Image (cartoon, rainbow, N blue to C red):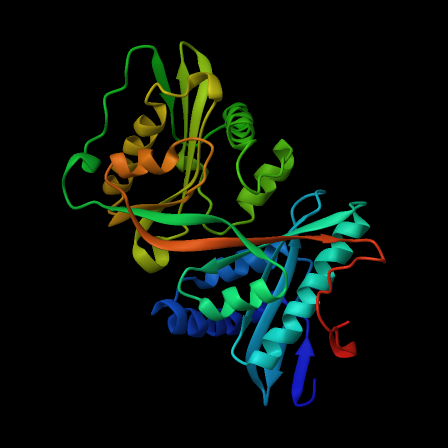
């Protein structure tokens, strides 16, 4: 790439990457949408020596791309952020090629590639479509503001239901993991994780806080869980519901609403301005209706675009030109 310097990042690049992402987000949605900790979390999930690239023009960072496998599956999350169209084109080629390499190396015949794109980002949507990706589903960012009202009041616990909260031991963590895995098994993009993999992934996030874990039991049986984190604390002074899951046998009993209202009340006690979560609009459960019913509203939509790319040497779907400097 004439005129550009390309290298792979280190964790020390988090601040420069954050500034780039903030600039691009501001152009697209009018404000930054990631904190420095968010970028550090992504970098911590990547194999930086193989799966991520930075592009500079005259010493200025103008592009960042990455491909991240999801466990041992053939699913690979990708992202492309660039200020220059030529840089975007080359990064698209690299991340899609790397996604195919990752899936092939894990023994899969196809790479299922996913990228999240803001609804307002017509340019990135067009780039995804041009490379064979198609809109698969949409995630709504839901928010409730804690300015009085029912969200401030801790709900009454129904008879037969026991709520476990506070800093958990291993037994409660294992219970929460089982509920989360079973509860999300049919959801878009789900890839199973062992207990150790799940705990490691949660604890790798600077915003993780196990004291915000809630587990509900019905007549002594594990039934539902909620894990809150501090992902939106630094920029919006809001709590965040990272996971909310109810086992199929216990759905329809109001446990999701109970856990949410309990989390809302806890966020009020912490002095937080609101609570945020993300929900798939095509969720196999009526989750969007639940969140609307407790007073949450949609404040942002992120569309998920997906393609299945064959990993064999005779694959018929081109992923773009791959320059030697990015190979």
Quarter of image, res 324: bottom right
Q: Is residue 142 visible?
A: yes
| Position of residue 146 measured from the top left corner of the image (x, y, whole percent) | 20, 45
Residue drawn where x is 56% and y is 55% of the image: 134
Q: Is residue 51 visible?
A: no
Position of the N terminus by quadrant:
bottom right
* Residue 23, placed above or below residue 230: below
Horizontal arrangement in the rendering, residue 40 relative to residue 242 (left or right): right
| Position of residue 282 measured from the top left corner of the image (x, y, whole percent) | 45, 40
Residue drawn where x is 26% and y is 34% of the image: 293
Q: Nearer the viewer, residue 208 or 284?
A: 284
Position of the C terminus by quadrant:
bottom right
* Residue 140, placed above or below residue 81: above
Residue drawn where x is 17% and y is 34% of the image: 150
Quarter of image, res 48: bottom right
| Position of residue 17 measured from the top left corner of the image (x, y, whole percent) | 53, 71
| Position of residue 285 measured from the top left corner of the image (x, y, whole percent) | 43, 30
Q: Nearer the viewer, residue 220 or 145?
A: 145
Residue drawn where x is 64% and y is 68% of the image: 92
Horizontal arrangement in the rendering, residue 165 relative to residue 20 (left or right): left
């Amino acid at each position: 790439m004439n005129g550009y310097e390309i290298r792979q990042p280190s964790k020390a690049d988090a601040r420069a990457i954050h500034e780039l992402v903030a600039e691009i987000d501001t152009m697209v949605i009018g404000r930054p949408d990631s904190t420095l900790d968010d970028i550090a979390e992504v970098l911590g999930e990547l194999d930086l020596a193989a799966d991520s690239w930075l592009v500079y023009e005259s010493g200025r960072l103008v592009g960042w791309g990455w491909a991240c496998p999801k466990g041992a599956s053939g699913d690979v999350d990708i992202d492309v952020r660039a200020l220059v169209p030529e840089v975007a084109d080359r990064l698209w080629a690299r991340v899609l090629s790397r996604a195919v390499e990752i899936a092939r190396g894990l023994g899969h015949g196809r790479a299922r590639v996913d990228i999240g794109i803001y609804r307002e980002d017509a340019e990135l949507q067009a780039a995804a479509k041009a490379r064979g990706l198609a809109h698969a589903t949409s995630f709504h960012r839901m928010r409730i503001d804690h300015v009085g009202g029912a969200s401030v009041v801790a709900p009454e616990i129904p008879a037969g239901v026991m709520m476990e909260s506070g800093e958990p031991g291993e037994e409660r963590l294992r219970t929460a993991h089982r509920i989360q895995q079973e509860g999300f098994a049919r959801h878009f993009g789900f890839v199973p994780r062992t207990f150790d993999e799940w705990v490691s992934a949660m604890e790798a996030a600077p915003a993780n806080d196990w004291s915000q874990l809630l587990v509900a039991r019905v007549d002594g049986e594990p039934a539902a869980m909620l894990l809150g984190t501090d992902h939106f604390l630094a920029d919006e002074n809001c709590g965040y519901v990272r996971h909310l899951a109810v086992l199929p046998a216990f759905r329809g009993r109001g446990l999701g609403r109970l856990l949410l209202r309990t989390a809302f009340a806890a966020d009020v006690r912490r002095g937080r301005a609101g609570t945020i979560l993300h929900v798939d609009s095509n969720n196999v459960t009526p989750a969007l209706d639940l969140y609307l019913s407790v007073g949450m509203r949609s404040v942002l939509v992120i569309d998920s675009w997906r393609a299945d790319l064959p990993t064999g040497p005779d694959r018929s779907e081109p992923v773009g030109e791959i320059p030697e400097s990015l190979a």
